Each structure stands twice: as structure tokens, then as C-alpha cells.
Amino acid sequence: MSPVVPPLSKAMLTRFAKLAQKKYRDQEGLFLAEGLRTVRELIDSLPDPEMLVALIVDEGARESMQWFSGFRGKLFRADREACTRLAQTTNSQGVFGVFRKQPGGRFVPGKRSLVVALDDVQDPGNVGTIIRTAAWFGADAVICGEGTADLYNTKAVRSSAGSIYAVRHYAVKELAAELERLQGEGFVVAAASLDGQDYRRSGEWPDRRVLVIGNEANGIGQPVLDIADRLVLIPHAGERPNVESLNASVSAAILMAGLAFV
């Protein structure tokens, strides 16, 4: 006999639907994830089971309901109208998870440490992909400067593929000031710039390094460039590139791969 799954109440629906807006995510300390794969990946990476608040599944999605059947007390069914209110994608799978945000606070760097800083990276897809890549390359933290898309935006969460808990991250008002603080702790700050030097020929690197990725259209802001220890670029093939620049998340991945192993 299948377990009885209670319906999502109107009060819960109203509360969770508001999580589409950053101000409510900040107030509640919660975020909404959508899609079976994204929700499952987040559950698999939970640092604490209590970080999962609720699972909401379209009452017609029997297979998904069965997969989440072990989460009694946190699993709720919803009708199509409720799922439409929660959905942030065009073709919703009718699977949603409500999770607690990662606890705030700065990270404690080790003797060897890689940090990624985002200066006004506005596309949430780029931000989520960079988080995922930073986790892959063992970064200790991702720092989000002002103007950077919220890491808990639904698109960013989906792009991070469940890695939102895998790397420490925090936001700062003054990115340049935070980078100067890290410089005081022995970090060298490398800023991705078209005016920089081939990252493969940047000489020796100290054990502690920060990679800064800038805005998709305008690059890194002047305050950060002014305090950067090194400007680095990714060389192109041929005499002239066939495109103006690389996508921000692609650039971040290439440079992280280079800095993670030097």
C-alpha cells in the first residue's frame, strides 16, 4: 500500500511561491529548487538532513512521488495549478524542493587555497556553472561581489547541479576591500583581463591564490583591477580570434583548471 501523501496547504504554497523573489529568500533563509534531477542532486549533497524543508510533487507524477516516498513528513502533493505557481521553467516536471541556505560566514583558508571571486557576473546560469566548476577543482570559497546574480536564483541553482552546498560562498558589498583583506592573509589576486598575460606564462604562484571573473560585457571593474597582483588572459588560436570573447563560465573553468594545479 502506498503511503498517504498530504496535500500542500494554501499557506505553504503562498510561502514557497514567494521564494522566487530574492528578498523573500533572504528573509526566510530558504530557496526553491525545481526539477527531479536538480532536487535529487541537492538531496544527495545535503550537509545535514535538516537542510531539506519540503518536497512538493505534482500529484500526477507517480514515479517521482515514489522516489521521494522515504521523506515522510516533508513530502507534499500539489495540483497542476499549484505547480504552475511554483514553476520557474516553461516545461516544469512538477517536482520542487525547498531547502535551507548554506550557513553564512567567511571561510577559513588552508595552507594551500584557491578562491574564486565574481565581480558583477549577472547571468545566474554563469554563476551556477562557476559554482559547480569551483567545487570540481576544489576551491575553498566563491565570493560574490555586488551586482553578481544571487546564487539561490532558481536558474543558478539548476546550473550548479546540486553543488550549492559543496563549496563555501558568501556575498560582499565591497569586493576590492575583501580581496585586500585576503592579500593580507597571503593571497595573490589574479584578475581575468584581455590586457593580461597568458596565464600559462605567469611564473610561479604562491599556495594561496584568488581568481577574479568579471562582468559578461564589461569585464572586471576598475577598483578590483587597481589592487590585482596579476592580470591573466586565455590565449586564442591564430593571429586573430574568430569571436570577441569567451563566455564567463567557460573562461572561469579554463583558468581554474590552470590555477588549481600550479
Image (tube, rainbow, N blue to C red):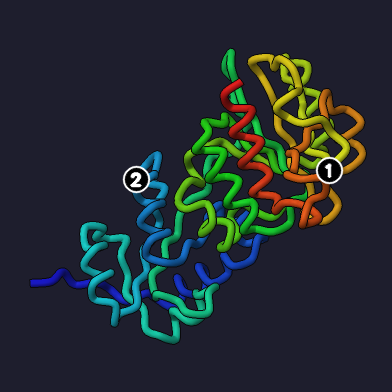
Give residue 211's position: percent from left, percent from top: 71, 32
Which residue does the numbered mark 1 point to in the structure image? 220
> As displayed, is residue 219 above or below residue 159?
above
Q: Which residue sits furthest bottom?
A: 81
Classify the position of the C terminus by image quarter. Answer: top right
Q: Which residue is mark 2?
A: 49
Residue 234 pos. (x, y %): 73, 39
* Residue 70 horizontal side relative to residue 111, left or right: left
Q: Earlier in the sequence, mark 2 or mark 1?
A: 2
Q: The residue under label 1 is which amino acid type?
A: Ile
Secondary element under disc 1, as helix, strand or loop, is loop
Residue 201 % position (x, y)? 74, 23
Q: Furthest residue to the left?
A: 1
Q: Residue at x 58, y 52 (%)?
A: 128
Q: Residues within 10 Å of mark 2 (few under 14, many from 20)?
A: few
Residue 216 vertical placement versus 69 (above, below) = above
**Residue type of the residue flagged with mark 2:** Pro
Out of 16 and 126, give the one closest to the viewer. 126
Asked if marks 2 and 1 touch (Cβ < 8 Å), the reply is no
Residue 177 image position (x, y, % from top left): 83, 30
Confirm whether residue 86 shows in the render: yes
